[in-house]
Image: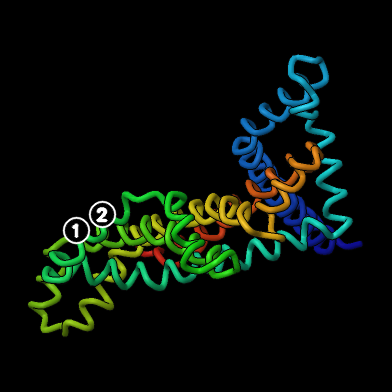
C-alpha cells in the first residue's frame, strides 16, 4: 500500500472517530438531560416502592409501585386501558378544541375593542369565578347525562384560562409597534395579522397549556358522573371493585396523558413563536 493510500486511510479513520465521538457526546448529553428532568420522579417512585415493601405504608391502600406497573401492563394487554383512553381523549380534545375556537377570537376582540371590553368584562369576571364543578348539576339538568354534558363541562373550564391570557396578551402589545406600522401606511388587517396576532401568540399558548391541564382534571370529574366508559369511569369502577393497583395504574395514565399534551403544546409554541429567539 502506497504512502498516499495510507494517508487517505488514516484521514478517513480520524474522521470516522471524530464523528463517532460527536454522536456519542450528543447521546450522552440527551441522557444527562433526561436524567436531570426525571430525577425527582425517580426518587419519588423509589421512595414509594421502599415504603410499601418495608411496611411504612399500608399496602392495602397504597400498593408497591412495581405492582402498579404490572397492573398497567395487564390493562394495556387486555385492551381495557386503550379503549377507555381513546374515549376520554375524544371527549377531552373536543372540549379543548371548542374552548380554543371560542376563547381565542373572543379574547382578541375584548382585548382590542374598547366597547366590546366594556360590555363583556363584567360578564367574563362573573362567570370565570364560578366553579365548573359547581355547575355540573346545571349541565346535567340542561343536557342530560350523555356525551354533550361531558364535552360542555370540559369546554366551559378550558375556555377561561385561554380567554384571559389572550386578553392579557393583546393588551400588553407595545403600542409603539402598532404606531410604527401605521406610520408606514400598513392596513388595519395587516397590523392585526403581522403585529397583534404574533405578539399575542405567547400568551395564547400559555392559556392553552393551562387549559390543557384543566381539560384533564375536568375529564375525570365529568366521567365519574353518568358515564359507562372513559378513564374517569374506569378509576371509579376499579375503586368500587377494590382493584387498587389497577386504579393507581389508571391514575398514572392520566398523568402520562397530561405530560404528553403539555410537551406537544410546548413544541407547537416553539414552532409558532420562533421569532422570540431571534
Residue 58: give its label: none
Q: x%, y% of residue 150?
A: 55, 63
Please give left or right for residue 266 compared with residue 172 in the image.
right
Q: x%, y% of residue 135?
A: 43, 54
The residue positioned 59% from the left and 69% from the top of the image is: 147
Please give left or right for residue 166 compared with residue 257 in the image.
left
Q: Nearer the viewer, residue 29 or 75?
A: 75
- Where is the N terminus found, in terms of image quarters? bottom right
Q: x%, y% of residue 225?
A: 61, 54
**Where is residue 222, by image quadrant?**
bottom right
Q: Nearer the viewer, residue 39 or 259?
A: 259
- Residue that mark 2 sits on: 126
Q: Nearer the viewer, residue 207 or 184?
A: 207
Figure check: 233 above or below 248: below
The residue positioned 86% from the left and 41% from the top of the image is: 70
- Residue that mark 1 sits on: 122
- Where is the C terminus found, in terms of image quarters? bottom left
Q: Mark 1: which secondary structure?
A: helix
Report whether residue 74 is seen. Answer: yes
Q: Residue furthest left?
A: 183
Figure check: 226 above or below 65: below
Badge 1 local density, few (<14 within 10 Å), some, or many (20+)?
Answer: few
Report whether residue 278 is seen. Answer: no
Q: x%, y% of residue 229?
A: 71, 60
Please give left or right for residue 35 compared with residue 179 in the image.
right
Q: Would you say the residues marked 2 and 1 are in contact, meaning their CB atoms lie under 8 Å apart?
A: yes
Amino acid at each position: 500500500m502506497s504512502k498516499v493510500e495510507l494517508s487517505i486511510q488514516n484521514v478517513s479513520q480520524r474522521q470516522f472517530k471524530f464523528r463517532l465521538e460527536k454522536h456519542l457526546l450528543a447521546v450522552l448529553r440527551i441522557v444527562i438531560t433526561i436524567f436531570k428532568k426525571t430525577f425527582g420522579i425517580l426518587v419519588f417512585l423509589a421512595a414509594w416502592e421502599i415504603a410499601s415493601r418495608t411496611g411504612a405504608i399500608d399496602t392495602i391502600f397504597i400498593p408497591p409501585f412495581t405492582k402498579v406497573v404490572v397492573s398497567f401492563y395487564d390493562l394495556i394487554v387486555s385492551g381495557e386501558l386503550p379503549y377507555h383512553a381513546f374515549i376520554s381523549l375524544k371527549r377531552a380534545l373536543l372540549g379543548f378544541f371548542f374552548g380554543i375556537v371560542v376563547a381565542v377570537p373572543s379574547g382578541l376582540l375584548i382585548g382590542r375593542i374598547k366597547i366590546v371590553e366594556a360590555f363583556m368584562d363584567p360578564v367574563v369576571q362573573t362567570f370565570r369565578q364560578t366553579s365548573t364543578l359547581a355547575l355540573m348539576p346545571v349541565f346535567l339538568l340542561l343536557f342530560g347525562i350523555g356525551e354533550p354534558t361531558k364535552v360542555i363541562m370540559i369546554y366551559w373550564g378550558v375556555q377561561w384560562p385561554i380567554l384571559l391570557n389572550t386578553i392579557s396578551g393583546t393588551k400588553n402589545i407595545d403600542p409603539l409597534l402598532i404606531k410604527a406600522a401605521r406610520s408606514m401606511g400598513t392596513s388595519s388587517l395587516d397590523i392585526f395579522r403581522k403585529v397583534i396576532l404574533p405578539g399575542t401568540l405567547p400568551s395564547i399558548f400559555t392559556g392553552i397549556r393551562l387549559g390543557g391541564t384543566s381539560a384533564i382534571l375536568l375529564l375525570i370529574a365529568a366521567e365519574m358522573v353518568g358515564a359507562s366508559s372513559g378513564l374517569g369511569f374506569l378509576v371509579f369502577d376499579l375503586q368500587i371493585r377494590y382493584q387498587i393497583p389497577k386504579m393507581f395504574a389508571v391514575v398514572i395514565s392520566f398523568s402520562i396523558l397530561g405530560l404528553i399534551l403539555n410537551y406537544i403544546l410546548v413544541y407547537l409554541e416553539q414552532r409558532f413563536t420562533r421569532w422570540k429567539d431571534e
